Image (cartoon, helix red, strand yellow):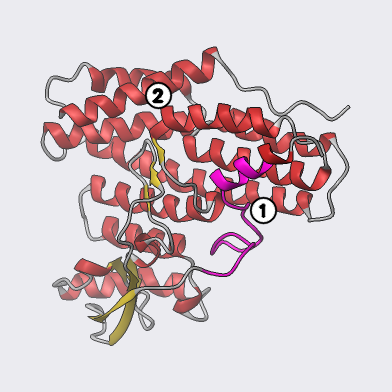
Amino acid sequence: MRCAGALVIALLLLAPPAGAQDTGPVYGPPAPRDVKTLTLVDPVDGHAFQWEVPIASNALGGYDSDGCTYARGEQSRTSGVATSPTSLYSARAESFERDLTDEQTQSLLVLLSGVGADVDDAKDLSPAARYSLAAAVAEHLGDPAFDVAELYLIGGWTVRDSIVGFLPGVRGAGDAWNKLQEVQALAAQVTDPHPRTRALFDLARLAHRGGFPHERDDFLQKLDSFPDAGIGAQEKRTEFRRRVTHERALLNQARANYRRGLEAREGDASDRAVARLMVADISRRLGEMDVARDEAEAVRMDTAAPPEVVMQAEDVLQAVKTQRAQPIAATPETK
C-alpha cells in the first residue's frame, strides 16, 4: 500500500461501510442508547404499551440538503414512529393518540388486518416499515398530503442511516461535494485491495449522502477493477444497492405526496416553498436533474419563500450544476 497516512485521514473522516443488516454498519460495537420511555394507548383497540424513543442531543453529523440531520449514536427518528403490537396502528410517537370515529376505527382495522397477515411480531418491523405504515394510516384518515410526504421522507432517511452510518460534520450538498473531492484524492493513493475496498465504500457512502447518484454508482462499480479483498465486497455492494433501491422507493412516495399537496395548495406560501424544495432535492437524488433544476429555480424566485429556504434552493442548484459540469471520476484502477 502506498501512502498509509492518507488512508488514515480518510478513515478518520468517514465511518465504516454498511453491512448486511438494515439496522446499521457492520463494523464496531453498537453505540450506547440514551432513551426515554413513553406509555402509549392504541386509538384503534385501546391497548396500552410502552415505547422507547432514543434521545439524540447533538448534531455532530451535520445535515443533508433535504433536511436530514445526524447525531452521533442512534438517531431519534429510528423510533420516531410507534407501532401498536396489537392492531399495527402506526403514528408519530409524540402525537400517537387521536380521536377516531367508529367508521374510522372499522376501516383502519380492515386496512391494518391486511398488513398484519404478513407480520408475526410488530417489534420486528424496520423503522422504514413503521414510517410507511404511519403514512398509509395518515393518508387513510385524510391527513394533509404534506404530512404524509414527510412520513415517507423520514422513512427514507432511516434507510439512508443504514447506508451512510456516521459521517461527521457534512453540511449540505456543496460541503458533501467538497469533502468528496478531498477524500477521493486521498483514496486514489491506496492500492492494497483491503483498504482500497474500504475506501471505495467510504466514497460511495459520502456520495450517497450528498445526493450524487452517478458518482456513487461509479465508486461501487470500481470494486470490479481489482481482486476481492476477502471481506465480502460483492455481497456488501449488493446489499448497499438494495438499500439504495429501498430508499428511492420511499423518496418517490414522498415526492408524489409533496406534489399532491402542491396541487391542492395545502398550507401557506412558506409551506409550499418548502414542499417545492423537497421535490427539487428528491429529484436530484433520483438523478432527474432537469426537474431538480426547474423546481429549485422556482423556489429561488419565489418571493414568499423564507430566506433559509432560498439558501437551500441555491445549494441544490449549485449541486445540480456541479454534478453536471464536473462529474467525479472514480478512483483510478490499480495498474
Q: Where is residue 208 in the image (x, y as percent from the top left)?
A: 54, 39
Which is more N-terminal, label 2 or label 1? Answer: 1
10 Å crowding of disc 1: few (<14), some (14-19), many (20+)? some
Q: Quadrant of the C terminus?
A: top right
Residue underneath mark 2: 292
Q: Do the residues labelled 1 and 2 touch (CB within 8 Å)?
A: no
Amino acid type of the residue that numbered disc 1 sits on in the rendered structure: Glu
Residue underneath mark 1: 239
Answer with left or right where residue 249 lies relative to residue 318. Answer: right
Residue 260 picture quarter: top left
Q: In which quarter of the image is the N terminus?
A: top right
Amino acid type of the residue that numbered disc 2 sits on in the rendered structure: Ala
Answer with left or right where residue 298 lies relative to residue 214. Answer: left
10 Å crowding of disc 2: few (<14), some (14-19), many (20+)? many
Q: Where is residue 6 in the image (x, y as percent from the top left)?
A: 67, 37
Q: Position of residue 137 (x, y in %)?
A: 30, 63
Q: Mark 2 falls on what kind of element?
A: helix
